[in-house]
Image (cartoon, rainbow, N blue to C red):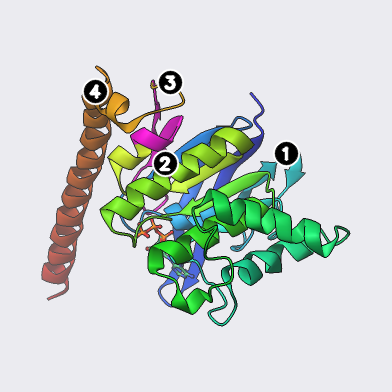
């Protein structure tokens, strides 16, 4: 079935000094409009590679990606991206940083209208009193809030989040997760988010997609998250299916680990045998 976002037989091969490295191969994923998907997988399996191809920041080497009926061939304001650290202009204020993007997306609006949009999203993320504070004088959590406000202010069709809370302390992380869900309830933006945290994935998303270990990583497991929205953290934690779903995800990740250990041992054994034959 066609989706609002379609990744079809997506692949990425990097050229490396040791030859071509097939990192992602035959990665297939369709997303519905407004759906929130979390992408998980072991470190180095290729999650950021997939996300950066959807962002148009990393050339695709096989297959294709379609967002809202348009094939991706580069970055564009239809896709807002938030990384682990927000890459702000440190000498500019929170408002000026958000305005940088807003000015590009709403070139025909008046300055007051554009400021209103930026102020609206900065207020939603809890920075209503920091509009004129320079980015360098904001805490890491506040800077990340500016990054999130900037992404939403562009009114993207799709939001791409690469471990957006990865560098934050757990309290700020939980607060920002809730703020993000609240904004998404209003704006209903189709969202793909990378996380390493199974609990974060279960709290935030409609579906969790876990990748196999690389090389040639692909979709290994898809889990439909059964919790209704709006979600309260306490209700999710007390849901009768919570630990069952969590256990399935952890089991899959552990199985991937064991598979990798077995493959590594086999490679070492083969290398030893080749050495023995050669000597
Ligand atoms: N430009 C590049 N050239 C060569 N190899 C690359 C390049 N970028 C990434 N890789 C390799 O591709 C693999 C996947 O990297 P990627 O960053 O996509 O993984 P990830 O799952 O997001 O990892 P993590 O969870 O640790 O952030 C890694 O082995 C990485 O070394």
Marks 1 and 2, the one that precedes in the sequence: 1
Which mark is drawn over residue 68? 1
On the image, which quarter does residue 81 sit in?
Answer: bottom right
Report the mark closest to the observer, 2 or 3.
2
Report the mark closest to the observer, 1 or 2.
2
Farthest residue toward the front? Answer: 129
Nearest the camera: 91 or 31?
91
Q: Is residue 169 above or below residue 188?
A: below
Real-space Cα separation, disc 2 to disc 3, in angstroms: 15 Å
Marks 3 and 1, the one that precedes in the sequence: 1
Marks 2 and 3, the one that precedes in the sequence: 2
Marks 3 and 4, the one that precedes in the sequence: 3
Q: Residues within 10 Å of mark 4 (few under 14, many from 20)?
A: few
Instruction: Tell me the element at label 4.
Output: helix
Q: Give the residue at x 18% y 65%.
A: 271
* 113 to the left or right of 130: right
Q: Give the residue at x 56% y 53%.
A: 123
Which mark is drawn over residue 178? 2
Real-space Cα separation, disc 3 to disc 4, in angstroms: 13 Å
């Amino acid at each position: 079935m066609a989706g609002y976002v379609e990744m079809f037989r997506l692949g990425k091969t990097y050229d490396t000094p040791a030859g071509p490295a097939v990192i992602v191969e035959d990665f297939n994923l369709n997303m519905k409009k407004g759906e929130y998907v979390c992408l998980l997988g072991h470190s180095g399996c290729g999650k950021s590679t997939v996300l950066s191809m959807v962002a148009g920041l990393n050339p695709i080497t096989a297959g294709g990606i379609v967002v809202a009926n348009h094939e991706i061939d580069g970055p564009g304001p239809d896709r807002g991206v938030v990384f682990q650290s927000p890459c702000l202009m440190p000498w500019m204020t929170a408002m000026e940083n958000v305005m940088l993007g807003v000015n590009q997306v709403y070139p025909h609006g008046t300055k007051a209208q554009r400021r209103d949009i930026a102020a609206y999203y900065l207020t939603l993320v809890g920075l209503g009193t920091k509009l004129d504070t320079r980015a360098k004088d904001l805490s890491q959590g506040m800077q990340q809030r500016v990054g999130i406000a900037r992404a939403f202010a562009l009114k993207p069709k799709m939001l791409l989040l690469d471990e957006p809370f990865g560098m934050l302390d757990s309290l700020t992380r939980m607060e920002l997760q809730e703020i993000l869900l609240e904004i998404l309830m209003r704006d209903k933006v189709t969202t793909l988010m990378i996380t390493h945290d199974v609990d974060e994935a279960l709290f935030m998303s409609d579906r969790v997609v876990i990748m196999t270990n690389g090389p040639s990583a692909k979709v290994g497991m898809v889990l439909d998250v059964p919790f209704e929205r709006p979600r309260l953290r306490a209700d999710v934690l007390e849901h009768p299916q919570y630990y069952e779903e969590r256990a399935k995800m952890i089991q899959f990740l552990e199985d991937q680990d064991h598979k990798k250990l077995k493959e590594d041992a086999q490679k070492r054994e083969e290398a030893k045998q080749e050495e023995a034959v050669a000597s």
